Image (cartoon, helix red, strand yellow):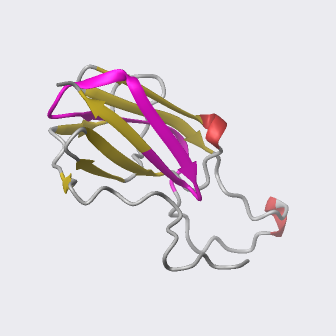
Amino acid sequence: MKAPAASSPLLPAVDRDCQEITILETRTSTHPFATSWRPAVNAYRCQAHFVIFADLAGIPPEAITVSVESRRLIIRGSRPAPEPGCQRSELAQLLALEIDHGMFERVLDLPHEIKADELTTEYRDGLLRIQLALKS
């Protein structure tokens, strides 16, 4: 596999006028999708929009849903458990079991209202990029 050139990032760069923000609240909920794991996120507030990245490695795009409300972003999905590909009777010893799997829900309460109809997403190499326009 050919590595990308240093000058061409896999995802669009975050605007230089963006600053990393502290999400007011990030939580799992009591929704049936919620379980004990949460994907990691980075969140930025730019002059006219938020940019959020979610680490969703190993999750097929069709297993991810993104929804928004006035000041809230909700990311839901399910990651299958990775399997070694051999019969369980062939396994002699489990050495490590650290990769989270199953259903998840990540809720981000944002510090500013957003335009729910101006949501864009891009999913590449296990990284979900979400852009949300700010309400004026």
Q: Quadrant of the C terminus?
A: top left
Q: Position of residue 124 (x, y in %)?
A: 58, 54
- Judged left or right of residue 22, residue 36 is right
- Judged left or right of residue 113, residue 35 is right
Q: Main secondary structure of the magenta part?
A: strand
x 34%, y 57%: residue: 14
x 72%, y 58%: residue: 83
As displayed, is residue 57 above or below residue 9?
Answer: above
Quarter assignment of residue 68? top left
Q: Position of residue 29 (x, y in %)?
A: 33, 28
Can residue 116 be found in the magenta stretch? yes
As displayed, is residue 66 above or below residue 11?
Answer: above
Q: Nearer the viewer, residue 58 or 11?
A: 11
The residues colored magenta run 100-129
x 79%, y 60%: residue: 88
As displayed, is residue 31 above or below residue 45?
Answer: above
Q: Position of residue 35 (x, y in %)?
A: 44, 37
- Judged left or right of residue 78, residue 87 is right
Q: Position of residue 111 (x, y in %)?
A: 14, 34
x 25%, y 39%: residue: 26
- Judged left or right of residue 56, residue 73 is left
Quarter assignment of residue 57? bottom right
Can residue 134 be found in the magenta stretch? no
Q: How many marks?
A: 0
As displayed, is residue 59 above or below residue 83?
Answer: above
